[in-house]
């Protein structure tokens, strides 16, 4: 366990004001839970969480750009999942609820923007985050929506999606549930905030079932991304609180591809960690077999750029094969999908 | 250990934060809140069309719970019938764009087509200068060409009730929508929630409380939903009242085009429009000063009939005189008799040297060979359908926003709740249907990407698609109203020259018709393509003009082209007969 990195406790909420509130809130939370075992709700705490939930779910505030990005991320997830369903078994295609009956996890869920959408797609969704106040906010928000009710097990669990949040890290979750527990693993705009991205990626990948999907989104380390995400968004336009991003932590698309091309997955120590002998079902091999003209097979992995169009106030998923996409479209925000091979 | 303690605590918090929902979930029978995804307030054409659009889409039908609330009794609308030959006085010109939307959602099939009437041509002229502009299907086809999607008409006159009944019949087959009629919205409150993310709670007069993800205001000019959303609206009341009535008249003779031409004369007091419904019945919308509207409605039906005929025919100065006579007689307590009016009119006609055989004469014989100018005017009205004359005040209002925000979040406005418009271009209902089309698409897009359809992020594309679009139409209608309200000679001259020049520019006219919904959105040429076409045709027109002036008209193509055009027009006319 010591070799594995922990997600930085303050990831995604590095806003000075916001994080100070979080610290206060979480301190109180720890304190109160330590002093009194039985649940008696402190209105002060509720008020604290409420103020924070305003931040995550204020569609015109700090996270406004993230709200607008969400439909594009979901469009990508929808397209890839349906594409694979069609390739494999036409009868399995579920246009209305593409994630129906699948176990889905969102690592670093923040306020739950992506999680709620994943659950609406029919997935049995778990959102995890290292920050307890994020989890509180996400739970508070989801509680307003009857379609996301965790108690919807009254009806058959397989019918509708469900949503649950857990305050934990990906390492702890892996230790708790074991590898290959999820059909879909998502981690959006998180990897650029973690300390050891390689270990983080390995852990996320290990959670994926054979034939399952891993979705990531992050920012490429280019002059353009420095200009847009740090200079323009943080300092010039103040759309995002300065200090939110660290340019050196950005990861380029080809580095992502290279990782899944060269690293056998799941790693050997993981495959045998839970006592299961290494056999064909846990065979460890890279998920991308080879590159064709620098790009992976579309059935193995895919990279798509996301571009914000200020005049429309919307993000756009850059079409496949857009001319020179690697030069502009994938030089800043991009989505990455890779599939664990069926064995 | 500490972590797990925290976690359970968090859950408790979340539960505590919303005691109402927790109870509604576990003990459904004692629940006071009914959960729904979309609550539509208002059972008018816009509200019904939205319910139909949502229920006709398989994706949305299966994922959304929709409730429509209407204070009135919708079974009266669903069972509406009217004897053949008589018509309701609330009619709308359904554009081809609106009609194709209604076909898409499956509602048009339920419209009683026998009660609708195609419009092939529109004639609009200046009440003072007689400068005239004509729009016809041929103009549209000349620019964009014929094809599979070529409209065969400019628009379709339809009684509003005929459309509402069709929507209701379609909805009756679709069980996905719950229709709560004869139920009033007593109040709308925002649910109290920690963090302020409460959903709207709609309290109904039957005691139910609907908790909704999205609240749609299709509730008209005095929209309670708009008030709840805290959206201001900008506008004013015109010093104008619209008089509506169903007019009965002789059929057009076999020498004339059928009764499919809409007429509109812009008088300084407001426009008067003649809208065909059948060979012998048409609808009228006469926008005029409130005191005059009152006097017209109070007068003898035969006097009203005479006044309507005169309004389309007599020179403006005589009309003003007749209106004064009408008002004075009413004020003196001796209302104008039909006989007196006939005398007055025939005297005015003589003094204007209007030939009694001309179409401009009220004494013209409606049978036999019509005068040459008969197509320039609507047929002579013989009577007003009893009980059909009514009036309503005109206003202009446009909501500042279409989407509620902050304390009014999860609300959206469509139709008259968002905008009220001068009826001179007949665009009110079409704008509402355009809103509904855009909103349904927007909701579908949000569902496709797992979005929350009540969120601002999901609804923003709707506002972006419709706000400016509606504003353009509203501003144009308002400017027209004001432009034609003027009587100053230079202004009358300028607008008349403008209209006459415009009348020669077929391409510009076609572009205007396109903007007014002459074609369904999917059958429209792309923007740049249209721009190039308009420019090219404009240039052609200019070249034709120049060559004519210089006497270089021997351009064989031009002459042959014009000849051919005339021949085709003749053919088309003969086919109509």
Image (tube, rainbow, N blue to C red):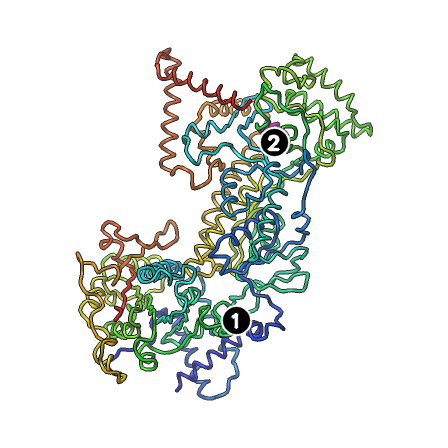
Give the camera-side residue of B318 and B338. B338
Give the camera-side residue of B113 and B346. B113
Q: Residue at x 34, y 58 (%)?
A: A79
Seen in the picture, residue B35 relative to B421 is either above or below; the reply is below
Task: Give the residues drawn in magenta, as a range.
Answer: B262-270
Q: Disc 1 designates what residue?
A: B194
Callout 2: SS: strand
In the rendered image, residues at marks 1 and 2 fall on the same chain: yes
Determine crowd level at label 1: few under 14, some 14-19, many 20+ residues with C-alpha closer than 10 A: many
The N terminus of chain B sits in image quarter: bottom left
* B269 falls in the magenta region: yes
Seen in the picture, residue A95 relative to B541 is either above or below; the reply is below
Q: Disc 2 designates what residue?
A: B275
Q: Report the magenta stretch's main SS.
A: strand
* A127 falls in the magenta region: no
Residue B110's label in the rendered image is: none
Callout 1: SS: helix
In the image, taking residue A173 as reference, residue B135 lies left or right, namely right
Determine crowd level at label 2: few under 14, some 14-19, many 20+ residues with C-alpha closer than 10 A: many
Give the camera-side residue of B577 and B423. B577
Seen in the picture, residue A100 relative to A331 is either above or below; the reply is below
Specify which label sits upstream in the sequence, 1 or 2: 1
What x and y, as percent, mark residue B272?
A: 62, 30
What x and y, as percent, mark residue B347?
A: 72, 15
Taking the image as drawn, is residue B225 in sight? yes
């Amino acid at each position: 366990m010591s070799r594995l990195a922990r997600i930085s406790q303050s990831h995604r909420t590095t806003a000075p004001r916001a994080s100070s509130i979080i610290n206060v809130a979480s301190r109180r939370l720890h304190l109160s839970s330590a002093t009194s075992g039985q649940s008696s709700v402190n209105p002060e705490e509720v008020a604290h969480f409420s103020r924070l939930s305003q931040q995550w779910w204020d569609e015109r505030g700090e996270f406004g750009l993230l709200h607008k990005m969400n439909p594009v991320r979901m469009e990508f997830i929808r397209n890839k999942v349906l594409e694979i369903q069609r390739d494999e078994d036409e009868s399995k295609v579920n246009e209305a609820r593409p994630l129906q009956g699948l176990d889905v996890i969102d690592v670093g869920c923040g306020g739950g923007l992506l999680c709620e959408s994943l659950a609406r797609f029919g997935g049995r969704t778990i959102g995890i985050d290292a920050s307890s106040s994020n989890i509180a906010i996400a739970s508070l928000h989801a509680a307003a929506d009857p379609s996301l009710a965790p108690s919807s097990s009254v009806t058959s669990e397989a019918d509708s999606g469900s949503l649950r949040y857990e305050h934990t890290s990906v390492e702890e979750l892996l230790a708790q549930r074991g590898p290959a527990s999820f059909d879909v693993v998502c981690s959006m705009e998180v990897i650029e905030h973690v300390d050891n991205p390689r270990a983080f990626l390995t852990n996320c990948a290990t959670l994926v079932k054979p034939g399952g999907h891993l979705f990531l989104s992050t920012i490429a380390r280019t002059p353009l991304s420095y200009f847009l995400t740090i200079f323009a968004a943080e300092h010039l336009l103040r759309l995002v609180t300065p200090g939110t991003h660290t340019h050196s932590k950005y990861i380029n698309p080809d580095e992502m591809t290279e990782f899944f091309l060269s690293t056998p997955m799941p790693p050997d120590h993981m495959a045998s960690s839970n006592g299961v002998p290494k056999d064909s079902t846990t065979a460890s091999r890279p998920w991308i077999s080879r590159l064709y003209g620098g790009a992976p097979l579309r059935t193995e992995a895919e990279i798509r750029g996301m571009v914000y169009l200020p005049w429309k106030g919307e993000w756009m998923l850059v079409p496949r094969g857009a001319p020179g996409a690697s030069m502009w479209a994938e030089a800043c925000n991009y989505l990455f999908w890779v599939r664990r091979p069926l064995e | 250990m500490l972590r797990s303690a925290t976690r359970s605590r968090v859950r408790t918090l979340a539960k505590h934060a919303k005691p109402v929902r927790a109870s509604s979930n576990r003990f459904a029978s004692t629940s006071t809140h009914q959960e729904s995804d979309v609550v539509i307030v208002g059972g008018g054409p816009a509200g019904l069309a939205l319910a139909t659009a949502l229920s006709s889409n398989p994706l949305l039908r299966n994922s959304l719970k929709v409730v429509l609330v209407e204070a009135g009794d919708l079974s009266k609308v669903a069972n509406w019938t009217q004897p053949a030959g008589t018509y309701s006085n609330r009619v709308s010109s359904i554009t081809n764009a609106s009609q194709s939307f209604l076909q898409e959602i499956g509602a048009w099939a339920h419209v009683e087509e026998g009660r609708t009437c195609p419009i092939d041509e529109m004639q609009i002229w200046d009440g003072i200068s007689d400068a005239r502009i004509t729009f016809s299907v041929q103009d549209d086809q000349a620019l964009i060409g014929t094809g599979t999607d070529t409209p065969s008409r400019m628009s379709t006159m339809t009684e509003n009730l005929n459309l509402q009944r069709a929507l209701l019949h379609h909805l009756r087959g679709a069980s996905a929508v719950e229709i709560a009629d004869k139920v009033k919205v007593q109040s709308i409150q925002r649910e109290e929630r920690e963090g302020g993310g409460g959903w709207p709670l709609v309290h109904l007069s039957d005691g139910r409380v609907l908790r909704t993800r999205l609240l749609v205001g299709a509730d008209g000019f005095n929209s309670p939903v708009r008030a709840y959303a805290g959206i201001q609206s900008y506008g004013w009341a015109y010093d104008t009242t619209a008089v509506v009535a169903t007019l009965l008249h002789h059929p057009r003779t076999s020498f004339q085009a059928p009764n499919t031409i809409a007429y509109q004369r812009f008088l300084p007091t407001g426009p008067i429009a003649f809208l065909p419904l059948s060979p012998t019945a048409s609808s009228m919308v006469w926008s005029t000063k409130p005191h005059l509207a009152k006097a017209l409605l109070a007068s003898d039906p035969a006097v009203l009939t005479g006044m309507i005929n005169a309004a389309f025919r007599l020179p403006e100065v005589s009309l003003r005189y007749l209106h004064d006579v009408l008002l004075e007689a009413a004020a003196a307590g001796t209302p104008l008799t039909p006989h007196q009016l006939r005398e007055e009119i025939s005297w005015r006609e003589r003094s204007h040297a209007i030939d009694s055989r001309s179409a401009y004469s009220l004494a013209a014989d409606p049978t036999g060979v019509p005068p040459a100018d008969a197509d320039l005017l609507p047929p002579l009205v013989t009577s007003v359908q009893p009980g059909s004359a009514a009036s309503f005040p005109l206003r202009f209002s446009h909501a500042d926003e279409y989407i509620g925000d902050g304390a009014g979040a999860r609300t959206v406005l469509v139709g008259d709740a968002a905008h009220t418009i001068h009826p001179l271009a007949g665009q009110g209902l079409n704008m509402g249907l355009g809103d509904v089309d855009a909103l349904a698409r927007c909701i579908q897009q949000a569902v496709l990407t797992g979005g929350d359809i009540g969120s601002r992020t999901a609804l923003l594309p709707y506002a972006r698609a419709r706000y400016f679009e509606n504003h353009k139409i509203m501003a144009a209608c308002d400017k027209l109203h004001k432009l034609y309200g003027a009587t100053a000679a230079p202004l009358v001259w300028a607008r008349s020259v403008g209209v006459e020049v415009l009348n020669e520019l077929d391409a510009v006219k076609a572009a205007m018709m396109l903007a007014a919904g002459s074609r369904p959105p999917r059958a429209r040429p792309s923007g740049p393509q249209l721009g190039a076409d308009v420019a090219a045709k404009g240039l052609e027109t200019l070249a034709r003009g120049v060559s004519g002036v210089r006497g270089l008209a021997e351009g064989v193509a031009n002459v042959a082209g014009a000849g051919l055009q005339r021949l085709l027009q003749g053919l088309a006319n003969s086919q109509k007969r």
